[in-house]
Amino acid sequence: MYKVSYDRLIEITSQILEGFGYPPDRAAITAETLVEADARGVPSHGVARLEFYKSNIDSGFAVPDADPEVLFETPLSLTVDGHKGVGPYVSLFCVKRCMEKVKQSGAAFAAVRKSNHFGMAGLWAERFAKEGFIGIALTNTIRAGIPTFGRERMLGTNPICVAIPGDGDDMFMVDIATSTVSRGKVEVYDRRGKKMPEGWGVGSDGHITTDPSEIVKLMRPGNPFGGLLYLGGEGEILGGHKGYGLALLVELLCVGLSLGDLSRDALTVKDATVCHFFGAIDLKLFGDVAAIKNKVSEILEAMRKSAKAEGQERIYIPGEKETENRAKSLREGIQLDDATLNLLNKYAAELGVEPLA
Amino acid sequence: MYKVSYDRLIEITSQILEGFGYPPDRAAITAETLVEADARGVPSHGVARLEFYKSNIDSGFAVPDADPEVLFETPLSLTVDGHKGVGPYVSLFCVKRCMEKVKQSGAAFAAVRKSNHFGMAGLWAERFAKEGFIGIALTNTIRAGIPTFGRERMLGTNPICVAIPGDGDDMFMVDIATSTVSRGKVEVYDRRGKKMPEGWGVGSDGHITTDPSEIVKLMRPGNPFGGLLYLGGEGEILGGHKGYGLALLVELLCVGLSLGDLSRDALTVKDATVCHFFGAIDLKLFGDVAAIKNKVSEILEAMRKSAKAEGQERIYIPGEKETENRAKSLREGIQLDDATLNLLNKYAAELGVEPLA
């Protein structure tokens, strides 16, 4: 493990992105998005994604200098075409526009098509919550998961993120892939030669496999069969149909409202990319904001203080681990694994950027 | 199994509710709510609930003739105190008010405290979707489930329902308890002497049990330990923290915004009842409504037509099974099990109402 300061990691990531052809403003917000994920202990959405971002440029799915275009707008909403631009830049554009609207109107929503990977959903929802609003961020992704009773990857990992502010810095933030696990987690099990738990994925017949290398192989482009399961696993006995229902909900809000590309096609069919949905709702709509924030914290505190399972010492609030990781990373530096360090230094060498020592 | 027509079941249910002291308008909407659930094949929310409704009146948690009161209101929202009134009546009140607001404003939300059991969440969300809006209905419930790493029942089964209209009658409606299963399902396994799958519930130590009678016993009032797990089961390996996060999201939107009673206390602590949250969003906010509905149906149709797992013949859209059950029930009558038939006829005899033949 290699440790690097937050600022230094931002610097090299920005420089590499500029080397990829990102204009400086887009490199800056993308570097922030990636480094924030590493700082929070979510490396699956961190700087290791540079490789994915580069490949999306090379294959024509991402256009670093494209500008988002507002297709339709009301005092409460906007519909945006990202023109295959940079995901974090398109997202920041939408969040800023929604922020103006929610302050004026009390609620704001954005449906976005033709965008690209926007990093951790939580980073966008959190911007609303930090201003005192309920924040929502959803996205579809490249095809990853299997509908209940199916065997074809039809939906992405389709995360749901909602952030709700409490007293002071207290905040609730659920930020979850609707698939049981991410593709990255399966890859980690594959590299370590471990069997997967039942409930993570199915083979090309649509039934449970515990072999991660089978899933990794099946999920390569070109083969649509076999892949991840949604929360609740195979069939209905543990609620797999519920996880599938939530993934499909995300698909409809992102793709349906924006008239965008289906996860089935995203980053696979020419010019098909991903869609997002953002939302912000003012607590003022419901009365006394201070009392509501207080009540939110009362509920969160009741969870924290409730009785622990035998052998457990702590009950977490969604988002809390990531907040604590971030504070630690800012204090002590961000940990990068060797593969990620080597990736950064490979790009640094290619692009004439100063490598990490 | 006994078969009864939809209209006859509405009639006797209304009469029994009036016998309980419900004014006729409240008896009518409550009977419709219960009978619709039976018609859709969701008997856990059907007329068998009359017993629960009666016990809530007897114990002072429900006041059949209480009127809902609007505490706070904006063009986009209302906050309501149900004054321990009838859940379906309070819900209908909120849905009607939100319907006016969404038609005017493009979006509408209601936070509700001091209400009671509102039946299937889907019935409320569907009212919005049938008018062309995205519909949302959430509720907390009596304590039922355990936070990840906990052993104390802190949250209800806290369902999430979102309905989205497609072309014509096509509709998506996810309507799911965030707990892996309902309390009713555990009771069925108990009556049949079957072992539960791992992932449904935990004992008083906070760890998996497969004994349904243990869960049923632990979930009696007075004991707060042991109960249901949320979607994803125990711990984090299959995503149990995600299901818990969704249940807590529902709690915050229902209880936090309305300043209502926590699930921990609802129907347990004196005067503490349940909270709801309703939402409606106009598709018009995002552009061409016909094109959006068309896209929604395109996505749903892609799911239906995708490749089936070996041994499976059909991939469902959330809500589809219930819609088909309803059509069959209207054609052929609604099925009641013997216990439910006997319950209705017991109340009929007590209240001087004509029994089911």
Image: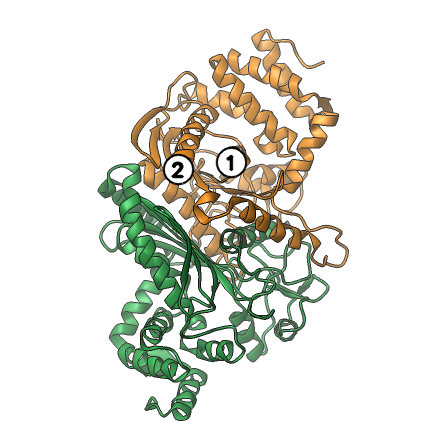
Chain colours: A green, B orange
Front-lying residue, B58 or B125: B125
Residue B108's disc is 2
Sequence-first tag of 2 and 1 = 2
Identify the secondary structure beneath mark 2. Answer: strand
Residue to which mark 1 is pinned:
B121
Q: Is residue A140 above or below residue A47?
A: above
> Foreground: B223 or A134?
A134
Q: Which mark is residue A213?
A: none
- Quarter that holds the N terminus of chain B: top right
The type of residue carrying mark 2 is: Ala
Element marked by disc 1? helix
Q: Is residue B11 left or right of residue B101?
A: right
Report the amino acid beneath label 1: Ala
What is the C-alpha distance between the residues marked 2 and 1? Answer: 17 Å
The residue at the point 59 percent across, 33 percent down is B44
The chain carrying label 1 is B
